[in-house]
Amino acid sequence: MQPVLEMKNISKEFPGVKALDSVQFSVIPGEVHCLIGANGAGKSTLMKILAGVYSKDEGDIFLQGKKVDITGPSQSKELGIATIYQELSLIEHLTVAENIFLGTYMKPRYGIMSWKKINEESSKIITRLGIPIQVQKKVSELSAGHKQIVELAKAIASHAKLIVMDEPSTTLSEKEVNTLYRVIEDLKRQGITIIFISHKLEELFTIGDRVTVLRDGKYVATKKLKEISQDELIELIIGHKVEKKKRETSKRTFQELLRVESLSNHKLSNINLQLGKGEIIGLYGLVGSGRTEVLKALYGVDQIKKGSVFIHGNKQKITKPSKAIQLGMGLVPENRKSEGALLHLSVRENAIVASHGHLSKFTVLLRDKVKDVVSKTISELRVKTPTPDTLMMNLSGGNQQKVIISRWLIHNSEILLFDEPTQGIDVGAKDEIYRVMREVASQGKGIIVVSSEINELLEVCNRILVMYDGKIVGEFDDPQNQKEEILHLAVKGGDNVESSKCRKTPVD
């Protein structure tokens, strides 16, 4: 079968960086072809060359066997290529129909736009995708999943035969992800080819036909996903086998750091939990179950209407984040770019932003002390940055996350709250984040981690609490051997939806 797309010997160099080195990439009609690699592997650069955002230095591109020279995004679009980036390009205050035909409004005679025809054609496309979205509704009123569908509708309206999807499920609920998968299958049946970029391995094996792996700007391999295991794919991505670390089996006496009793607010009901020194506990549940809301309540972002929070046995009233920080808490938020990282400041400035008080004298920062503590901490966390003066925006997602963690270690926070700590991070960087979490816990600090990925929690947690409809419905002391029960409870809830009192569980 003739490939719909061939990219041969593609090279691209930026000042001081060889982003792509003679890369090969080929896609056949009607397949979902996954593209994966660690951060910096060259995935985005390759796709931006296809989209006309970057020009290639060397190599050739063929569409349907014909050589093409893509000089800009408009030409890429004319050639039937549509790219849906992780950060959507929709205009929030316009309607769904206006977004779908933005820049390509159909005009009848005399050059007058027919809004009626635009709405009708938009409705046809949305109906074709099988999603009930009102096309006269403003995009700002849509869920994240429906916004993704509108982006797909834009691609179809442009008569795209090849659609590139960059991390399309990052912000979607489980239900919306399943809808996205169904739509992709429908597009395949209609003869549309998908290039699918994702860091979630389970997602690739669910939706993909073949996968191409890049590493350090070079082509590594193309495999049929049904003929390769996850471990084999990980080995291709990072270049070596991932050694499974054995858990320590020595028992330690439980020493309480945090206790929550009967906490309730507008989203939560009767939350009881306990966190000990050196312990990592996980909060698992479906989107909307209240996982993130627990962290927000503890951190003072959401108001607590009823219940008590104790730190080191002392009852505390936490009404704002500054109070939580003062009491030794640190939050690593779900959206690091908008809520955690100060992208236009340096690594050093990001690392010390919570610690000016003990790093200054008479309100003047002690330069040598700052330099020493930042260098020591980012070295311990293995942050890959040219210098501490490098802007945060120039770091990979995994390294940005480690800088945010360093912020709370420099502040000497005892209780760390992690919300989706590896979202949008490649598999190699994930392993690094897990290592950091274990090392932080080994220092006697306590961690509560929220994640949509059950395997992530099984990897790092001593205990897992399951949430359903704003309540803790189960607690598992041996989660590695109770995966099925955890998943069942997360989906079905339980007859007894109120959690039993948390036990003082020895830390493994």
Image (cartoon, helix red, strand yellow):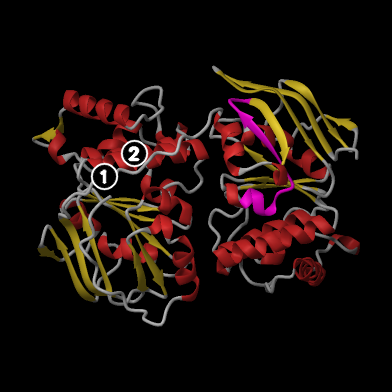
Q: Quadrant of the N terminus?
A: top right
Pick whichever, 163 or 33, lies toward us.
33
Q: Quadrant of residue 410?
A: top left
Mark 1 neighbour class, 10 Å CA radius: few under 14, some 14 to 19, many 20 or more: many
Counting residues from the N terminus, which is met first, the one under dot 1 or under dot 2?
2
Q: Amino acid at mark 2?
A: Val
Mark 2 neighbour class, 10 Å CA radius: few under 14, some 14 to 19, many 20 or more: some
Identify the residue position indicated by label 2 in the image: 436
Q: Marks 2 and 1: in contact by CB < 8 Å? A: no
Task: Residue 232: give x, y in percent of width and height.
Answer: 61, 37
The region drawn magenta spans 203-217
Pick whichever, 189 or 278, lies toward us.
278
Distance from Cα at disc 1 to Cα at disc 2: 9 Å
Identify the residue position indicated by label 1 in the image: 441
* Residue at 85% over, 40% down: 4
Left or right: 432 with respect to 7?
left
State the SS at label 2.
helix
Pick whichever, 494 or 395, lies toward us.
494
Residue 302: say if magenta. no
Task: Residue 380: give x, y in percent of width and height.
Answer: 30, 29
* Residue at 26% over, 59% down: 299
Residue 212: say if magenta. yes
State the SS at label 1.
helix
